[in-house]
Image: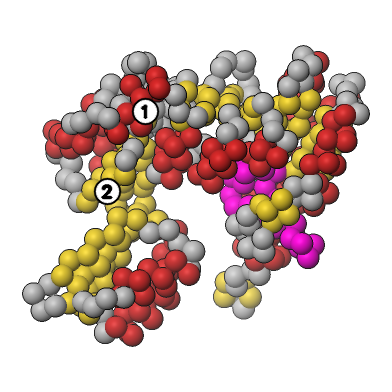
Amino acid sequence: MGLIVQKFGGTSVGDAEKIHRAARRAVQACDEGNQVVVVVSAMGHTTDHLIELADQVCQHGGKPYTPPKREMDQLLVTGEQVTIALMAMAISAQGHEAISFTGGQIGLITDQSFSKARIQSIDKQRIFKQLEQGKIVIVAGFQGITPEGEYTTLGRGGSNATLVALGAVLKADVCENYTDVDGIYTADPRIVKNARKIDQITYDEMMELSGLGASVLQTRAVEFAKKYNVPIHVRNSQNDHEGTWIVAETRKMEDIVVSGAALKKDLIRVTIKDVPDRPGIAATIFGKIAAAKVVVDDIIQNVMMDKTATISFTVERGDLADIRASVDQLTSELGAHASFQADLAKVSIVGIGMRTHTGVAERMFQALADAKINIQNITTSEIKISCIIDKGQADTALQVVHDAFKLDKAR
Ligand code: ASP
Ligand code: MG
């Protein structure tokens, strides 16, 4: 007998039939002797539709208006609230006791950052009390409440954060993440046809992969799972196949040099020229960017003969609007000049075996060279190598790198 937290993403609860199918899994896990908590996302593309609706309303006199973040969260939390009630009904209809809770009702307290709030605590007593009475507990994903009683959301895909946080505080034996794919792949199977489902991957590798473009799980959720050592099992809600286990590192896993490859498209390089070369400048620049809560990558600084510096970095295209004002302000303050280069992509490989194996970078660069793909910049960490390339060559790059490390073959 164990405690299982199951999470069903939007596509796994898209209609009444799918809700019943998900309900059946929860009931089955319960019948097998487990205590079961179920986290649900909003049905199908509900969250996207709510955002579109807000966009439509936020037009005034022909001018777009940015909705207040508080009201946006107020709107978005409604999606998950529909699913929890329906899921509780489906489970009851199948003859098992169930009770649903919003984030606020289980005291899922977050900070005040609307649209990307961080979880601070959860009142597990309320959940345990229901579990002890034999009920299946259903919790709305993606949402929380501030100590002042304001509704918050945890960022897109945030039901995973709810799943893992519950897994951690309830000390669950496993967090099952049900989605519409069979697990985590060695590369995006929509691009790389011979991509293979990975059986087991470490938290660290998964964090790198999600940060580099693999969209199945948010980096933050995996980070949390690692901290509390909760295994995550990513699996398909439409079948009973074993999915991918995300777990702590074991000795054996070190033999796999590269576990997966990832691709990020739509990057923009920001170049700031004629920056005075003196201490504190980089801190000023990146302090401003960080204040806009934008993640920058691939920072390069060159010092010119005339003692000015050129600093460049990449950001995701969607983030450009958030930093534009800071960049403009910086350039005018520093007497510097900014330019922007769009249509860049980043191809990366990830594997904990890189720590102990040599020649990995060379193999990646050679594969790109053979495909006549120019590498514009390289960044590395202990367990990843990333290359910035032209967006037009992105899909090919992913394929050739995948081939170079024979990722289609299980080790
Ligand atoms: N419904 C939210 C979203 O679509 C949260 C989630 O699905 O995890 O982003
Ligand atoms: Mg969703």
Q: Residue furthest front?
A: 251
Label 2 lies in ligand 1 vicinity (Cβ under 8 Å): no
Tell me, yes or no, whether the highlighted magenta stretch contains residue 48.
Answer: no
Query: How many numbered callouts?
Result: 2
Query: Quadrant of the image for the C terminus?
Result: top left
Q: Is residue 193 visible?
A: no
Callout 2 touching callout 1 (CB < 8 Å) = no
Pick the front one: 291 or 204: 204
Tell me, yes or no, whether the highlighted magenta stretch contains residue 147.
Answer: yes
Q: Secondary structure at mark 2?
A: strand
What colour scheme governs how the chains and residues are painted in the rendered image of this protein?
A: secondary structure
Give the residue at x 41% y 71%.
Answer: 287
Magenta range: 141-162
Q: Label 2, on which residue?
A: 379
Indicate the position of residue 105 as horizontal and vertical percent values.
83, 49
Badge 1: residue crowd in 10 Å (few <14, some 14–19, many ≥20): many
Indicate the position of residue 103 as horizontal and vertical percent values.
76, 49
Query: Quadrant of the image for the N terminus?
Result: top right
- At label 1, the amino acid type is Ser
Give the residue at x 25% y 67%.
Answer: 311
- Above-or-below relation of 408 to 87: above
Label 1 lies in ligand 1 vicinity (Cβ under 8 Å): no
Give the CA distance from mark 2 to mark 1.
18 Å
Name which of mark 2 and mark 1 comes first in the sequence.
Answer: 1
Query: Where is residue 34, by image quadrant?
Result: top right
Q: Label 1, on which residue?
A: 259
Q: Secondary structure at mark 1?
A: loop
Badge 2: residue crowd in 10 Å (few <14, some 14–19, many ≥20): some
Give the residue at x 57% y 75%.
Answer: 63
Pick the front one: 62 or 231: 231
- At label 2, the amino acid type is Thr
